Image (spheres, rainbow, N blue to C red):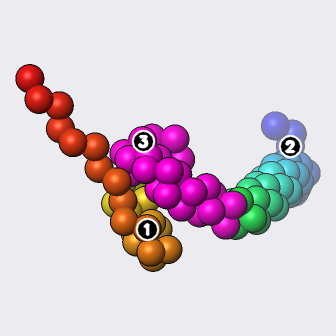
């Protein structure tokens, strides 16, 4: 700390301003990355829906499709039913 309060507070202000600008740049990069990932997700949803429907027509169980896609079994059933495909459920194993 110097004897000049204006120099001290001015230096502190400049330091904080640089930190703030760096934080804003980081946030802007994160926003851009988030937008890019959202666009990628939007682009892949239709091909994924088509594959889910194809899997349903091939009599794959919704639970298996859900495991492979990350969707819930209920969401898989909704997609299949919206496409006119009745979800296939395996018969329970008899012991």
- Can residue 38 be seen? no
Looking at the rendering, in which quadrant would you find the N terminus?
Answer: top right
On the picture, is 46 further left or further right than 55? Answer: right
On the picture, is 88 further left or further right than 3? Answer: left
Indicate which disc residue 3 carries: 2
In this rendered view, identify the residue nearer to me: 39 or 23: 39
Q: CA distance from mark 1 to mark 3?
A: 16 Å
Say which of marks 1 and 3 sits in front.
Answer: 1
Q: Residue at x 57, y 57 (%)?
A: 54
Q: Residue at x 44, y 46 (%)?
A: 60
Query: How busy is the neighbourhood of tag 1: few (under 14 within 10 Å), some, or many (20 plus)?
Result: some
Indicate which disc residue 85 carries: 1
Q: Main secondary structure of the magenta part?
A: helix
Indicate which disc residue 64 carries: 3
Instruction: Say whether marks 1 and 2 touch (CB < 8 Å).
Output: no
Query: How busy is the neighbourhood of tag 3: few (under 14 within 10 Å), some, or many (20 plus)?
Result: few
Q: Residue at x 44, y 75 (%)?
A: 84
Instruction: Say whether marks 2 and 3 touch (CB < 8 Å).
Output: no
């Amino acid at each position: 700390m110097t004897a000049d309060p204006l120099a001290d507070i001015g230096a502190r202000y400049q330091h904080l301003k640089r930190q703030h600008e760096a934080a804003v740049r980081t946030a802007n990069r994160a926003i851009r990355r988030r937008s890019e990932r959202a666009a990628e997700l939007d682009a892949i949803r239709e091909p994924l829906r088509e594959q889910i429907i194809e899997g349903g027509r091939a009599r794959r169980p919704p639970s298996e499709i859900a495991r492979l896609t990350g969707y819930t079994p209920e969401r898989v059933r909704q997609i299949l039913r919206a496409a006119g495909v009745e979800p296939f459920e395996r018969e329970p194993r008899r012991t």
